[in-house]
Image (cartoon, rainbow, N blue to C red):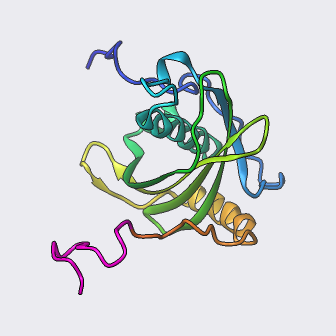
Amino acid sequence: MAENPARVVTPYEGTGHRPWDDTAPVPAPLDLHSTPVRPEWVDYNGHMSESCYLRVLGDNSDAFFRYLGVDEEYRAQGRSLYTVETHLHNKREATEGAPLRLTLRLLDHDTKRLHLFHEMWHGADGTLLAAAEQMLLHVDTAQGRACPLPGELLDRLGTIQAAHDVLPAPEMAGKPIGIPGGRGRTGRRAR
């Protein structure tokens, strides 16, 4: 299959990753990705467009995948991580050129799933700009279905989980979306 030259490319593709070091402490939270707001990410309101928030968070996920050991070589073996759900909380606007610093924490995992929480900070003044949580699924790409993570990655996730379990639970994690007293999932306004 030929490579698609127009496909989305993350800033980390082709860069490999640092080898996992069993003796190195795991930062809590992880601080793996930063970027300035690019001119092409700014919309007609003069702020970073909402789709670009998700793009930058996706790049943060990719940095985490590489930290874990999921890179081009891993994907060439027919396994990958797919996002199955994302909840994005836009807190403040980001303008062109603003320095973005992203953190990531592992909230939970099992043999096939990872629950991540991202925070996007203004790199100069420390203002929280956005937060997101994601549910990821480990897949066998040839079969197109979920499969267990290999033991080596589960061990690494256990190490990361232990480091991140000392952090307080993010206030925004697990929050449903809806209008209080509104129609919600039923389609009818609550009385």
In the image, is residue 184 part of the stretch drawn in magenta? yes
Please say if 63 is above or below 108.
above
Left or right? Give the position of 160 relative to 88.
right
Pick the front one: 146 or 99: 99
Which quarter of the figure is the C terminus placed in? bottom left
Residue furthest out toward the front: 191
Q: For the point 28% across and 15% down, which residue is it?
A: 2
Residue furthest out toward the top: 5
Q: For the point 60% across and 69% down, which residue is it?
A: 171
Residue furthest out toward the bottom: 191
> Magenta residues?
177-191
Left or right? Give the position of 61 relative to 177.
right
Q: Position of residue 77 (x, y in %)?
A: 41, 38
Q: Position of residue 190 (x, y in %)?
A: 24, 83
Q: Position of residue 121 (x, y in %)?
A: 68, 43
Left or right? Give the position of 124 relative to 161.
right
